[in-house]
Amino acid sequence: MHLSQPAASKILKDLEGFFGFAIFVRQPRAMILTELGAHVVRHARIMLNEADRLVSDINDLREGGYGQLLIGAIVAAAPEILPAAIARLKRQRPRLSISLQEQTSDRLLTELEYKRLDLVIGRLTHVDQHNQFDFEPLRDEPLRVVVRQGHPLATGHGMPDIENLSRWPWILHPMTSPMRGVFEAALAAEGIASPSDIVETTSIQATLQLLLNSDMLAVLPHSILRRPLESGQYVLLERIIGKPLDYYGIITRRDEPLSTAAQALIEHLRELTEQPLDENGR
């Protein structure tokens, strides 16, 4: 920034004088945010991201483009409905630049809050988030236990109870994800401890490869499993873990207008939710 330390300290002191409170607590080897200072920094980051987006959009339009659309999505929405909606939008707006980020809902909502995404296809993760975001439900998701073809549980007689299932190695989403929450709640309801032999990942491809090369179990939304099951390499166990996941849906920042591209994508999502997809996802 081409500033000396005294100049930067003076700017910070002037800023704290403007706000009327300390933004940082000065320590010998660190600067620690105060509670009010954390709110200042949060809004500053949002403003900087918004300014960066403005510059990017202006440059894109100046060079003959049609803007950008930044989408975040959970894995349950990614296999079918969202790609079909994006394909429709690209046929309408071939020069629109679209970026798709796949993650868990909690991480995507942080990106949405800081304006690094335009909208999210996911789930609210805290009860108070309805004050910050608008949510339009699309579909719910039953969770199924999946193993490789030839797994001992797939070829044995009968279905082990959940306590015996918990003794097998598992591939699970991180603790912060709604999918993991359903799994842990199902175990807690029966007084069963969480599995100790686990791999945590949000990657569907990694999960499917681990299943093929081990005796691990995974719990996944049924929509993700439709195509892998058609290959004959995987088997669904009869047991369903916990209740279906709550509806995933369209999440946007509350009281903030959407771009025309975002509005068009939402319309396609609504239409696709109301009708079954054909073999080409259209």
Image (cartoon, helix red, strand yellow):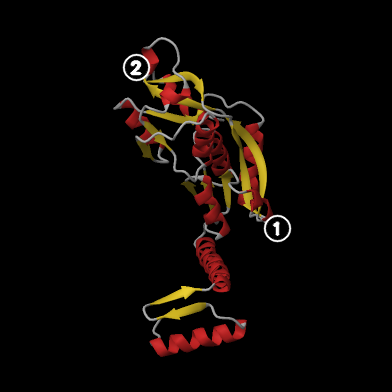
Q: Which residue, given by chain and number where applicable, does mark 1 sit on?
A: 255
Q: Amino acid at mark 2?
A: Pro
Instruction: Name the residue located 55 percent from the left edge and 52 percent from the top edge.
Output: 109
- Cα separation between marks 2 and 1: 53 Å
Instruction: Name the residue located 36 percent from the left edge and 27 percent from the top edge.
Output: 168
How many neighbours does mark 1 have within 10 angstroms: few (below 14), some (14-19), or many (20 or more)?
Answer: few
Q: 92 or 127: which is nearer to us?
A: 127
Q: Position of residue 216 (x, y in %)?
A: 35, 28
Q: Residue furthest left?
A: 213
Q: Which residue, given by chain and number where applicable, does mark 2 sit on?
A: 152
Left/right placement of residue 28 relative to residue 109 reads left
Q: 42 or 21: which is nearer to us?
A: 21
Q: 168 or 79: which is nearer to us?
A: 168
Q: 34 or 178: which is nearer to us?
A: 34
- Mark 2 or mark 1: name the one nearer the start of the chain: 2
Instruction: Name the residue located 50 percent from the left edge and 63 percent from the top edge.
Output: 56
